[in-house]
């Protein structure tokens, strides 16, 4: 039976999150170090090729696509954006430590969300609906390989919801420029909405 391989890649490093700031939908660029690190990763490792390339609309993901897949036009999907931190965008935990709503949110209280931002439940619903459309689209068109360049929060959420072996979101955290390959089998997907995580990205080039 035909299976479908989808490769998730987290965008390269940005200066703001390295400094501890919450960056979700803020449209910041890759840092110079982030660009150089991606070039080195691509030079010394193997990223998967796929006929279909999807990307978040945010600049840091589009720049990552340009470096790893030069000349390939990505299909931009708005729902692949990171969570919206609202008024907390660009601020650090230290700056927000006295904010009661922030502390409730940080403790996992699902009844609160960032002011003018997106709740965890809404974010999960958004990215899951988007991912199901991508998988169903691949199955209907017959494309068996796709790359998705997106954000750490998106990858962690989707792996926790759909990935086997099962693990909590934080256990799926990955470094900039890295990610996972999953295998979708139509029968298993249609029955249980799960997929097999079978590889880390990128792969080391063997001598």
Image: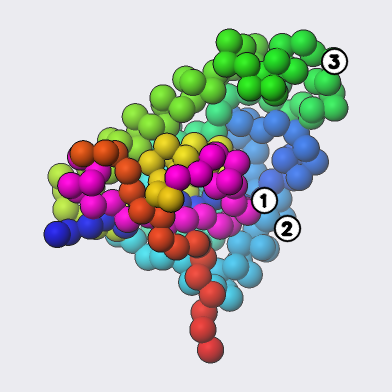
| Residue 40 position by quadrant | bottom right
From the viewer's perspective, is residue 59 above or below residue 183?
Answer: above
Classed neighbour count for the residue bearing mark 1: other residues with Cα under 10 Å, few (<14), some (14–19), many (≥20): many
Disc 3 is placed on an element classified as: loop
Queried whether the magenta region covers residue 85, the answer comes back as: no
User: Residue beneath label 2, please?
Assistant: 33
Is residue 54 shown left or right of residue 141?
right
Q: Residue at x 24, y 43 (%)?
A: 189
Q: Do the residues labelled 2 and 1 touch (CB within 8 Å)?
A: yes
Pick the front one: 93 or 88: 93
- Observer-nearest of 185 and 154: 185
Mark 3 vs 1, N-terminal side: 1
Q: Quadrant of residue 45?
A: bottom right
Q: Nearer the viewer, residue 179 or 40?
A: 179
The tag earlier along the polypeptide, 3 or 2, is: 2
Of badges 3 and 2, nearer the viewer stands: 3
Residue at left offset 60%, top offset 68% = 41
Q: Which of marks 3 and 1 is in front?
A: 3
The reply to whether residue 57 is in sight is no
Instruction: Say how the picture is coloured.
Output: rainbow
Residue topped by disc 3: 98
Residue receiving disc 1:
13
- Range drawn in magenta: 166-190
Locate residue 110: give its quadrant. Answer: top right
Does the magenta-highlighted stretch encompass residue 177? yes
């Amino acid at each position: 039976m035909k299976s479908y391989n989808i490769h998730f890649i987290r965008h390269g490093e940005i200066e703001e999150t390295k400094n501890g700031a919450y960056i979700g939908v803020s449209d910041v660029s890759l840092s110079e170090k982030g660009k150089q690190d991606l070039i080195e990763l691509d030079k010394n490792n193997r990223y998967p090729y796929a006929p279909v390339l999807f990307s978040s609309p945010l600049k840091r993901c589009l720049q990552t696509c340009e470096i790893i897949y030069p000349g390939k036009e990505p299909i931009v999907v708005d729902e692949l954006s990171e969570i919206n931190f609202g008024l907390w965008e660009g601020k650090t935990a230290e700056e927000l430590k006295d904010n009661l709503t922030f502390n409730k949110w940080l403790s996992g209280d699902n009844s609160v969300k960032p002011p003018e931002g997106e709740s965890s439940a809404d974010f999960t619903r958004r990215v899951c609906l988007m991912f199901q459309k991508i998988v169903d689209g691949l199955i209907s068109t017959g494309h068996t390989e796709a790359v998705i360049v997106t954000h750490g929060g998106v990858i962690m959420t989707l792996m926790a919801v759909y990935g086997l072996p099962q693990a909590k979101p934080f256990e799926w955290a990955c470094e900039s420029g890295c990610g996972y390959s999953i295998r979708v089998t139509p029968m298993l997907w249609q029955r249980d909405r799960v997929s097999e995580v079978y590889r880390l990205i990128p792969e080391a080039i063997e001598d």
